[in-house]
Amino acid sequence: MLDEIVDKELKSSDAVDIKLEDIIKIAEVLRKIRSKYNDELHQEEIKIYEQLAESLFELRLSKYLENGKISGFDSFLFSLIETIKRFYVEFVTGKYQFYGNKVLCRVLNPFLYQNVRLNKGDLIALSLDKALILTTAGYITPNL
């Protein structure tokens, strides 16, 4: 199960290509355990699996940071981390324009913000946290 995937990841110098189907099978078994049993023994079992999942994430994150690539069911997470890294670097190195303490952003995809519809090409000044969230969601770009 999950321990075997962690073991493979530990033994490989590159990130292992973990299939979504394999993770879904494991998750379904654990979901059934969570819903069927509520005793202390099964709660401890779930904690062990949670620790294994955390270890797997940390292993894959370290391999991503070393090699810059991950394939498998969780590759989208590492794309998100890449977007966050790029946002951070561009912010710290002065690529963004500010309006007061807010970053000036251009809308890429229409969305509703505080009951105002923003369309592609509109400009909006956002706090850094909101700019990061909307950048990772693909709604805005602070690169002006």
Image (cartoon, rainbow, N blue to C red):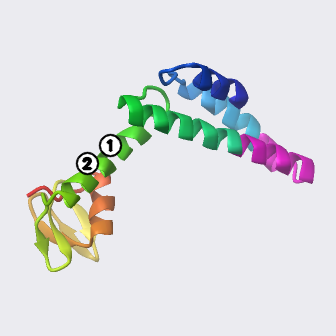
Residues rendered magenta in the picture? 32-50
> What residue did someone put label 2 on?
86
In terms of secondary structure, where does tag 1 sit?
A: helix
Of residues 37 and 72, the one nearer the viewer is 72
Q: Is residue 103 magenta?
A: no
Query: The disc labelled 2 sits on which kind of residue?
Result: Arg
Q: Residue shown at 51%/34% (left/top)?
A: 60
Residue beneath the point at 49% across and 25% down: 15
Disc 2 is placed on an element classified as: helix
Residue 46: in magenta span: yes
Please name whichever residue, 139 or 59, is drawn nearer the observer in this view of the structure: 59
Residue type beneath disc 1: Glu
- Would residue 10 appear left or right of 80 to someone viewing this image? right
The quarter of the picture where the N terminus appears is: top right
* Location of mark 1 (residue): 82
**Is residue 109 something one can see in this rendering?**
no
Q: Main secondary structure of the magenta part?
A: helix
44 to the left or right of 115: right
